[in-house]
Every structure is written in C-alpha cells, then in structure tokens.
Image (tube, rainbow, N blue to C red):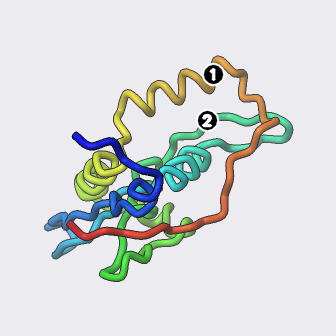
Amino acid sequence: MALLTRDAILKAEDIHTEKVDVPEWGGEVLVRGLSGRQRDEFEGSLVEHRGRRAVMNTANMRAKLVAWSVVDEEGKRLFTNGDVPELGEHSAAAVNRIYGVAARLSGLSDEDVDEMVADFGKTGGDSSSSPSRNGSTGQSKKS
C-alpha cells in the first residue's frame, strides 16, 4: 500500500452515504456518515449544562444522530436539531435502523458511547472546555 501525501489525504472523498429502507415511513432515506468534526459536535451535543455543572445526557441520542445523518440528494441535512424531539416520537425500529447505519458510517460503536459516558463520569463533568457547535455539514460522497 502506498504512503499517502498530505494533498492526497485532504482531497480524499471519504464520507460515504447509504440508502436505508424504512418501511415504517413508506420509503427510503439517504444516510451520510459524519466527518470527524461533526462527530465531535454530535458527541458534544450530548453534554448538558446545568448551572456550573456539565452532565452527560444520552436521552434521544438515536434521534439526534438520525437528525445529523439523514440528508437529501445534495448532501444537506433534512432535519434540524429542533426536529430531534419529534423524531424521537417515531418508531423505535425505524430510528434504530437508521441510527445503526449512521453509527457504522461514522465509526461510532456502542462501546464508544459507553466509553464516552464512563470517561465523562471520571472527569466529574468539568465544564471548563466546551464543545464546538458551529453546525457545519461537511461534504458527502455517494457510494
């Protein structure tokens, strides 16, 4: 295997999309994996600030990842963060199916989530560092 150059890495189209059949909703959705920055932002969105304390809140986590990952044919998000509560009220089977594909495409495993929650508990929820929340959507590559 060849040694990659800086330019080759920066030009790589490495974020993939996949169609997912959602019979509960009567069709298909296009799911895109997150970029590294988007994954950090998604993980940061699971941190909730309560006064001076920061706590991990994984409530509606699957719907959050669905909202971040379901895109239109141009690669733009279909849902906003404000749509998460309503998405969370839909079929658990449908949401979980999409979540599974989005997690796989984003390199996010159940073990990663467990580790994130455990690591957060070890740090005591120090709120001195806050996650970036610029809401960028990155580029997509259809596979």
- Number of numbered callouts drawn: 2
- Find residue 26 and report its image quarter: bottom left
Q: Is residue 84 left or right of residue 97?
A: right
Pointer 1 or 2: first along the chain? 2
Residue depicted at x 34% and y 59%:
15
- Find residue 124 and report its image quarter: top right
Residue 16 place in picture, x, y as percent:
29, 61
Identify the residue at the far top of this view.
122
Residue depicted at x 46% and y 47%:
61
Residue 104 place in picture, x, y as percent:
28, 46
Along the viewing direction, whichever of 91 and 97 lies nearer the viewer: 97
Residue 93 place in picture, x, y as percent:
23, 52
Amino acid type assigned to the residue bearing label 1 in the image = Gly
Q: Secondary structure at mark 2?
A: strand
Along the viewing direction, whichever of 142 and 110 lies nearer the viewer: 142
3D distance between C-alphas at marks 1 and 2 = 8 Å
Q: Which residue is mark 2?
A: 56
Residue 80 place in picture, x, y as percent:
52, 71
Q: Secondary structure at mark 1?
A: helix
Residue 19 numbered mark, or none = none
Q: Is residue 135 left or right of residue 99?
A: right
Q: Are marks 1 and 2 in contact (CB under 8 Å)?
A: yes
Amino acid type assigned to the residue bearing label 2 in the image = Met
Residue depicted at x 44% and y 64%:
67
Q: Which residue is mark 1?
A: 121
Q: Dividing the image into 4 quarters, which one contains the C terminus?
A: bottom left
